[in-house]
Every structure is written in structure tokens, then in C-alpha cells.
Amino acid sequence: MTTIEAIRQEIMADPMNESYTKRGVPPLFSAPKEARIAIVGQAPGRKAEETQMFWNDASGDRLREWMGVSREFFYSTNEIAHLPMDFYYPGKAKSGDVPPRKGFAEKWHSRLLAEMPHIETIILIGSYAQKYYLGKRREKNLTETVRNFEQYAPEYLPLVHPSPLNYGWMKRNPWFEEQVLPVLKEQVLKSL
């Protein structure tokens, strides 16, 4: 059994995840040893959990477009790791999904990242990932953190969530497509 598989078994055996394991829901993450890029998002959505494919929705289509990679490549490569802030679908909230559970990333991310020595860039999607990884280094809000992306590079690249719910944000912040997305594509191309 590989170290990653042993960690997966520990995650499933953790009392924090008991209700998912009892229902036969495995943790949804990917940590290939060869990975050079890690994508850290919020948590799998309902469709991702049902299909056991991360970013398997309109947000994923947009993320792949931003990265400049095909759907086929995205799911077949061992050079991209997927480490959401929670490896299980947390449920529906009034607007979007329930936030990832507190303490989840703290418990598992460092162990998984230690098994991926070739990671060059961690793409931080949304405020939960940015808060955890950037801590006090982040700006006063998500918009300003993303706007100042260069100060975190090349180790981290903060992004807004690619959800269709963020079309308004994109229109109000045209600099994102003009300045951030070309850097994202360049970093992905360079790393893969």
C-alpha cells in the first residue's frame, strides 16, 4: 500500500468522516507523486461527489478554460493534484454550498503535500483556500488578494472561484482576465 493510499484509509477511518464512510462515499482528492501543480478549492460539489470527478461541472469547465487544458488532459494527467479544503460534499446552503469543515485541511493537507515533492505552484481558488494557505499575508478581501497575485508567485496563485455565480465579479474586475489569466496559463504550460 502506498503512503497516499494509507492516508486515504486514515481519512475514511477518521470519526470526523464516519457518516460519509458508512454511506460508501470516499474522500475526493488526488495526490500523484509526479504532480507539479496543486489545485486547492473549497470542497467537492454534489455532482463531483456523485461522479467521483473533481470539478465536474460548469465551474470545472471554466477552470480548465482558464488553465488552457482540455477536459481529457485535466482528468488523465498525474501532473495536477486536487486538494480541496474538504474532501467531501458538505451540503447545500442558502447561497451555494456549505463551507468546508474547520480543521479538515489542517489535518490532511501537509501530509499529502509532503508526498508530492515536485509541486511548483498551488492554485488557491476562493477565500477559504487563500485564508488557510496565505494567512496574514493575504489582503483585506478576496478581490485584493487576487489583484495582488504577483506577491505570492510562483509558490501560490490566488484565483476567484470559476463559478457561473461570479460572472458579475468578472465584469466588475476586467483586470482579472487581462492580467491574472495569462499568468495562470503560462504557469500551467511551464509546469506541465
Image (tube, grey):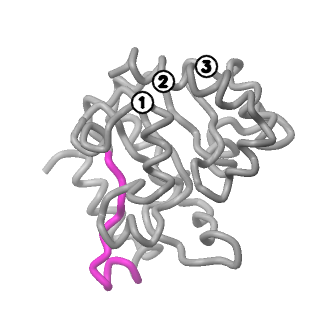
Q: Position of residue 11 (x, y in %)?
A: 36, 63
Location of mark 1 (residue): 68
What residue is shown at x 26% (from left), y 62% (from top)?
9
Q: Secondary structure at mark 3?
A: loop
Q: Nearer the viewer, mark 3 or mark 1?
A: 1
Which badge, 2 or 1, is on the more N-terminal residue? 1
- Indicate left or right for 147 with 181 as reference: right
Q: Secondary structure at mark 1?
A: loop
What residue is shown at x 41% (from left), y 83% (from top)?
19
Q: Quadrant of residue 87?
A: bottom left
Q: Position of residue 135 (x, y in %)?
A: 72, 39
Dominant SS of magenta comes to loop
Location of mark 2 (residue): 185
Q: Is residue 25 magenta?
A: yes
Residues shaded magenta? 19-30
Q: Nearer the viewer, mark 3 or mark 2?
A: 2
Q: Secondary structure at mark 2?
A: helix
Separation (CA) of disc 3 from disc 2: 13 Å
Label of residue 153 in the image: 3
Q: Residues within 10 Å of mark 3 (few under 14, many from 20)?
A: some
